[in-house]
Amino acid sequence: MEENKLLIRYDNVEVCRKELVVLKEVDFKLYAGEFVYFIGRVGSGKSSLLKTMYADIPVTQGDASVLGYDMRALRRRDIPLLRRQIGIVFQDFQLLTDRSANENLQFVLKATGWKDKIEIEERVREVLIQVGMEKKAYKMPHELSGGEQQRIVIARALLNRPQIILADEPTGNLDPQTGEQIVSLLHDICRSGTAVIMTTHNHHWVESFPGRIFKCTGKKLLPVESVRE
């Protein structure tokens, strides 16, 4: 993947939830291989901004392009094609509780058009090794710790070799030591070429694992040099 390839471009974008303006005049660019933090208080618009990037919230004002898709003119049938190129990591895991870790991952590949059983098994094995969970693949979600579940979620996000991973408070339900392992893993993934945007209100991660920082404050997205600004 070319470095400095532009993946996301937002010009003067407005983000609304239920007709309320959450963020306005958003200008933002994401390039291949970058690690970016969105920081700010709960309710400041971080998660809503991420949701516009995978078309969970529509963009109705400004110009927004994600992976070549015009988000103002995105057709419903193109949304799955966009999302296949984006890995999403949720705070609350959202694993299927009636299937093993392995079956959770196979389900996603089958749902996104993979047909060959051997190729599916091989890809699942690759991402499990990447997140250090190859020995726990047979376990059900309730048999895994929070950190282990989040590793499976990251493996799920990697399955279709996305260009971007959006991680929404990925350490929010984890203890500090486990959270640190998850942030470190996301940085490893970024170094392998996948751009990562992570929302957090834990400033420790931002100081320990550097990246570009944007702060949601006063309905604006502002670039900052440090979490102390």
Image (cartoon, rainbow, N blue to C red):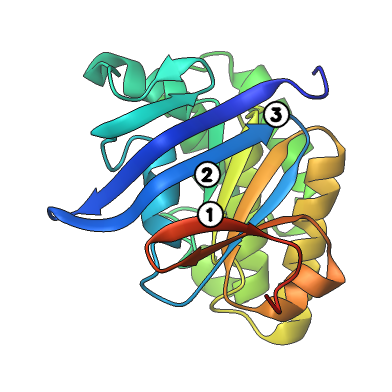
Q: Which one is in front, 144 or 183?
A: 183
Task: Measure the C-alpha gap from mark 1 to mark 3.
Answer: 16 Å
Image vertical order of residue 155 relative to residue 114, above or below = below
Name the residue type under label 3: Arg
List x then y, in percent, for residue 134.
Answer: 78, 51
Residue at the spot of label 2: 103
Name the residue type under label 2: Glu
**Discs 3/2, front:** 3
List x then y, in percent, for residue 218.
Answer: 40, 68
In the image, is 88 to the left or to the right of 32?
left
Residue drawn 35% across the image and 25% down it: 71
Task: Measure the C-alpha gap from mark 3 to mark 2.
Answer: 12 Å
Upstream in sequence: badge 3 or badge 2: 2
Residue drawn 38% across the image and 26% down it: 63
Task: Report if the CB atoms under discs 1 and 2 are less than 8 Å apart.
Answer: yes
Q: Quadrant of the C terminus?
A: bottom right
- Residue 138 appears in the figure: no
Q: Secondary structure at mark 3?
A: helix
Image vertical order of residue 58 relative to residue 208, above or below = above
Tag of residue 100 = 1
Residue at the spot of label 3: 123
Task: Report if the CB atoms under discs 3 and 2 are less than 8 Å apart.
Answer: no
Q: Residues within 10 Å of mark 3 (few under 14, many from 20)?
A: some
Task: Report if the CB atoms under discs 1 and 3 are less than 8 Å apart.
Answer: no
Name the residue type under label 1: Ser
List x then y, in percent, for residue 92.
Answer: 45, 67
In the image, is 137 to the left or to the right of 42?
right
